[in-house]
Image (cartoon, rainbow, N blue to C red):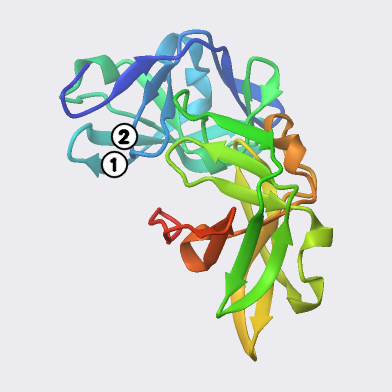
Amino acid sequence: MSDRVRIEDGPKRVRAYLGGRAVADSTNVKLVWEIPYYPAYYFPAEDVDLDALEERGETTRSPSRGDATRFDITVGDKTTKNAAYRHLDSPVEELRDLVAFDWGAMDAWFEEDEPVYVHPRDPYTRVDVLQSTRHVRVEIDGVTVAESHAPRMLFETNLPTRYYLPATDVRLDMLTRSDTQTACPYKGTASYHNVVVNGKSYDDIVWYYPTPLRESEQVAGFLCFYNEKLDIFVDGVREERVRSKFS
């Protein structure tokens, strides 16, 4: 492994589909951390349909991985531009015989036989949901907007504890629906509400998962508030506002 590029063996079979066909299918993927938060899948060239790739003469630059040659992918009558890349002359020798794909350019991704959404899962990220009887109260601008003795506490690696509250314990009359949606590979697709307090709208400060993924299904329909942006009291003690990538 390079001192500058984190690379690990991936234990799962991974497939990338385009146009109804697996363009890459491997049980020997490498996990390469191109950014700090999660890895990218890199496939051995022998596990990629190289005939579907066409070099277009374009490159992108990484200070640590070197120049990446970009390729179009054509399957049947479908062509996706610049969707694959190879670090053929990388200073990291281990990368030279590998192929990677832009996540959103592919139609579907699978780990084993289960779909993966948004981005590859970090093997060091864990999500635990626990039922609790702790007293959780949410306050915005001095006004209590939610209070519950039946929270679902979601613990996710490198993030603050999230308190998911039954909708019946939330001041629903203060909520207005938002069009915002976000997606998480561990929890699924979230919808959002704004909260109006003292005439001011706190936009997208509440979210919920109508149909969460399996490991997070216990929070289905429960409402969660951003710890980073309001005051949460647990058993009467106000928690410090945490800083995270969502602050």
Instruction: Kindly indicate whether the residue at mark 1 contacts the one at mark 2 (C-beta within 8 angstroms).
Output: yes
* Left or right: where 96 falls relative to 208: left
* Left or right: where 217 falls relative to 51: right
User: Residue at 73% of width from left, 56% of height from top?
Assistant: 148
User: Residue at 75% of width from left, 36% of height from top?
Assistant: 217
Quarter of the image with the N terminus in it:
top left
Q: Earlier in the sequence, mark 2 or mark 1?
A: 1
- Circle 1 residues within 10 Å: few <14, some 14–19, many ≥20: some
Measure how far apart labels 2 and 1 are at the Cα level.
5 Å
Quarter of the image with the C terminus in it:
bottom left
Q: Quadrant of residue 197?
A: bottom right
User: Residue at 60% of width from left, 74% of height from top?
Assistant: 203
Q: Quadrant of residue 13?
A: top right
The spot of residue 142 in percent (x, y) is 57, 79
Badge 1 amino acid:
Thr
* Left or right: where 92 falls relative to 123: left
- Which numbered marker is on residue 59? 1
- Which numbered marker is on residue 127? none
The spot of residue 52 in percent (x, y) is 53, 25
Front residue of 147 and 101: 147
User: Residue at 55% of width from left, 43% of height from top?
Assistant: 104
- The residue tagged 2 is 69
